[in-house]
Amino acid sequence: MNTDNGLKSNSEEAKRFSEKLKALGLPVLPMEDSFLNMEHLLRTIEEGWQDCLAAMEKDNFATMMARGLLPLLANEKGVSLIGISSRTDNGQPYPDVEVLFDMISEYFRFANMSWQDPPRQFMVIPNDTFQKIIKNHLLTDQQQRIKYLVGINEDMSTIETFLAIVLKAIELKASDIHIEFDDGLPVPESWQAKLSGRASQTNAGRIRFRIDGKLQDGNYVLPKELLNHLVGTIMNLASGINPIEHRLPQDGKISFSNQVLEDNPQLLPDRKILEEYELRIAIMPPADGGLNVTIRLLKSHGAIKPLGDLIPYPRIMERFTTLIEESQGLVILCGPTGCGKTTTLYAALNLINDPDVKVLTLENPREIRLPGATQIEINDKIGRTFPVCLRAALRCDPDIILVGEIRDPETAQIAASAAETGHLVFTTLHTEGSTEAIVRLQSLGVHAATISGSIQAILSQRLVRHVCPKCSTPVESNELLKELLGKRAPLLGWPIYFRQANPEGCPECKRGYLSRVVIPEWLVFTTKIKDFISAGKAGDTSELRKLAIEEGLRPLAVEAILAAAYGKTTIQEILSEAVTSEQLTRCGVLAHHALESYKEQIQAFQQQHFLGGSN
């Protein structure tokens, strides 16, 4: 345990040290941002070892080492990456970071070199890593380096790599990790990818993170051996996956149970973080070889997000909370994959999950743990299907049932019937909008009378990235709005501003955005809507939608424009993730009317948050 704490303190010390040197003007990055682990570092050194050795002989390696400097990689133009020990040669902390800065400057003057020509990068190396490189001659002796690499316990090495990737994904709040084989990929445009002249020959794939719905490259150079070992480790850790089957797609999961943690002690220092997550693993064998791995990070433990944080719209929140307190009925959430339906459902369930009610959930797979609820995971392979489990659930005297997804006629009919007979049922459908969900149920064989008698409301939603209020810029957008809403919508008679994201981002955000927010479309089943459906007219979706709007439905396009007006997101994000330009034009008059209705509130908000110095 003390060793783990020592390693952690070494790393933290190096990080603090690197920030101090960076503040003095050195182009410094912490080691953790450059290499996945010690093996990754050494394999990259191995790629350019001859040039590195030549540079060390030329530039007096012993002198550099004595001053706490390591020329980790080099090419014919000179040293291209220099490692700096976070401590002095005798293991003591540097009393003053300026002293080391002066020493580095003096050495470069002595060697008649500059860190600007050719461009060089500095990497602060934790003292324990520095000592390991020196004592084992891992930089100067190629044979020792190869022996060390071969002698590394492969499980130990790749589990550490796997852990580093998972922790990085958690830190970035990523929803998915993509590990992909492809030796035809260009080397990432990052300085560590360009350290060796032959780096492109060793780059076998990439790691990408999906953050706020967008894939972002991890910029790692992945040698084939490391990639193979990493995928092998994931397959060995995952339950439900055969690690020797490389021909077929496979699905499994990794739960950080006591047994997994005890079998892999490298994971123990981060136990508290890991235990909150369950990883869903999907293995896919591409045509060009290797195995691609997609990892979905599910925070199965820990606090469930409050419903009000997910749907920050008082008008909808008031109706939603009133409705879910009803004793029976069907509440449907719809939208495309990845739009946050399950997260919203659990936030709603958590609001009414009291000791005096029995909550039962059916999902494939279960994504979130709900304390006090009975949760069943569907497994079609053994016959534990949605219809079978739903029928059994009704015999267990539940008050509230969550059906993860309606995708077959039998489940649709049982769920609708249960909602008519004294149960509050929550479920999801993959449809474009709220009115389309009604047509979908009819296509699954649910009778019109059952639909009108069982459904309480339908919520269609989209997830858009929340624009950063710190670094985004408010831009007057009346002309843009007129273009979006079309010719039928009048020109707004007062100035309106929309935020424009800063693609560079700031310390508070990631590339101009932080987290995501729901754009909702809320359809409540009023008497007129129920009568329309009962009369068998729901097949005419245009008439159904027209009636729904008369009864208070506000289309997604209108909610999206209002969200932009209140600074929640940008027009670019709306058009990318929520609605099309055609949908905006179609709803132009409605959007104009909504903006006029909220004119005073919008102007007051924009004056305070956009124009009043509170950016």
Image (cartoon, helix red, strand yellow):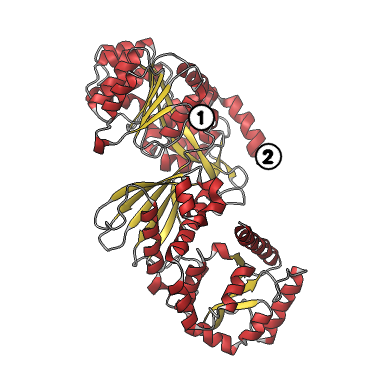
- Residue identifier under label 2: 614
Whether residue 27 can be seen here = no
Question: How many labels, in total?
Answer: 2
Task: Find residue 101 and report its horizontal and vertical position in percent.
Answer: 72, 73
Q: Residues within 10 Å of mark 2 (few under 14, many from 20)?
A: few
Above or below — where is 122 with respect to 75?
above
What residue sits 39% from the left and 13% below the top?
526
Q: Which residue is more in the foreground, 460 or 395?
A: 395
Can you name the residue that lies furthest to the bottom here? 58
Q: Which mark is residue 228?
A: none
Q: Quadrant of the C terminus?
A: top right
Question: Which amino acid type is marked by label 1?
Answer: Ile
Q: Quadrant of the N terminus?
A: bottom right
Question: Which amino acid type is marked by label 2?
Answer: Ser
Q: Please tell me whether mark 1 or mark 2 is closer to you in this view.
A: 1
- Disc 1 is placed on an element classified as loop
Whether residue 159 can be seen here = yes
- Disc 2 is placed on an element classified as loop
Judged left or right of residue 290, residue 320 is: right
Asked where in the image residue 255 lies, by quadrant, the reply is top left
Task: Find residue 272 and report its horizontal and vertical position in percent.
Answer: 55, 46
Asked where in the image residue 91 lies, by quadrant, the reply is bottom right
Mark nearer the N terminus (1 vs 2): 1
- Residue identifier under label 1: 311
Above or below — where is 543 with respect to 273?
above
What residue sits 45% from the left and 73% below the top?
151
Q: Are marks 1 and 2 in contact (CB under 8 Å)?
A: no
Q: Which residue is more in the foreground, 331 or 271?
A: 271
Above or below — where is 285 with respect to 534?
below
Cα distance between the residues tagged 1 and 2: 24 Å
Task: Find residue 299 and report its horizontal and vertical position in percent.
Answer: 48, 41
